[in-house]
Amino acid sequence: MAKVVLDHIRKEYENGFVAVHDASFEINDGEFVVLVGPSGCGKSTTLRMIAGLESITSGALSIGERVVNDVAPKDRDIAMVFQNYALYPHMTVYENMAFGLKLRKFVKKEIEERVHQAAEILGIRSILDRKPKQLSGGQRQRVALGRAIVRDPQVFLFDEPLSNLDAKLRVQMRTEIARLHAQLKATMIYVTHDQVEAMTMGDRIVVLKDGVVQQIDTPLNLYNKPDNQFVAGFIGSPSMNFIKGTVVREGAPQFVAEAEAFHFDFRGKVPGTAEGVVMGIRPEDIRIETPSVDSDDIIVEVDIDVVEPMGNEIFVYAHAGPHPLVARVAPQHVPMVGSKVSFSFETHKLHFFDVESGETLRLP
């Protein structure tokens, strides 16, 4: 296995469009790193540059100890699993998994050993004699994984490999790939637009937007300490609630929501120095029940719009003036749609962002 280093990587096309701006980060030997972001953010382009399927405009890309900018894909010692399984329909599962090894002139005995070992790991030994049309979506995905495993590459690359599967099977295959990583201890780079996949699978996550790296961190740090409003809103489902407002600093400092929907006093340090701010609160940090008398929680009067019982939790959609809010609460009695209730915000769970730049405002 090997470390992958991107040093000021840039991808610009002939028409002047820049898909990736100055990407610099390291993926350690044996690490599972997820590239995540909305469509068009540059995550797949970055992966394809690592694979050698896209040229690099500037910067240096290293796999192991060598710079591979001008190294052909077949000589980079990587294996890639695509969104499309790309299995040969006229070949059996065994033949599909063995094909790449045959091209590389491996001896028959080693091919058999590698294919059977990979099939054992993935639990597909019983289907080695079947053809792709006889397989389910999950089985085809396992065969595509097996074809990568037999290569024993330095780096595994995954380009949205689960997007063609149904929801239940995606969850199952997420677990399978995570287990596979733990078993192989391989360097893996995984691209997805699904932040749930990113949070549950990655050792670290690289969040991209418009070709620019927004933040690189562990899943929990991204969730609890986002660097900007985009990361805060992208990570988490339902996403963080955002409320525009101003900080009034005369006298006792206050946050006043736009349209004066509500306001509250800052009982501690005031974030940043700007007047225009965006307050953020995650749905699970909102409660419907009234806090105790000595609580520092903030009370906001809201009108309920929609209630979604999910079994183990309830999503309550509401609004305070022009500001939509969603709360994620435990199963309980919830007032009817159209009624007024009090939302309670946990003060120490509030986030604040600069209204212009979107950057997180840290407490002084």
Image (spheres, rainbow, N blue to C red):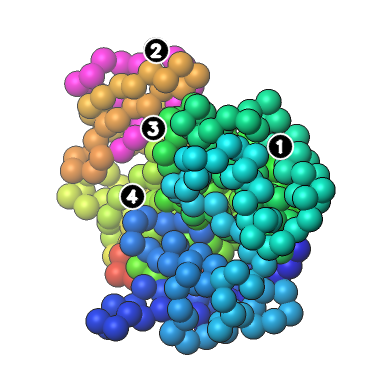
Q: CA distance from mark 4 to mark 1?
A: 48 Å
Question: Magenta stretch?
Answer: 325-345
Q: Residue furthest top?
A: 333
Q: Is residue 268 visible?
A: no
Q: Which residue is mark 2?
A: 333
Q: Name the mark nearer the viewer: 2 or 1.
A: 1
Q: Name the mark nearer the viewer: 3 or 1.
A: 1
Q: Which residue is mark 3?
A: 327
Within 10 Å of the Cα at label 2, are there few (<14), some (14-19), or many (20+) other Cα atoms?
Answer: few
SS for dot 3: strand
The amino acid beneath tag 4 is Phe
Left or right: 258 as drawn, with respect to 81: left
| Earlier sequence position, callout 4 versus callout 1 | 1
Q: Which residue is mark 4?
A: 242
Q: Residue at x 47, y 81 (%)?
A: 56
Q: Name the mark nearer the viewer: 4 or 1.
A: 1
The amino acid beneath tag 1 is Ala
Within 10 Å of the Cα at label 4, are there few (<14), some (14-19), or many (20+) other Cα atoms?
Answer: many
| Earlier sequence position, callout 2 versus callout 1 | 1
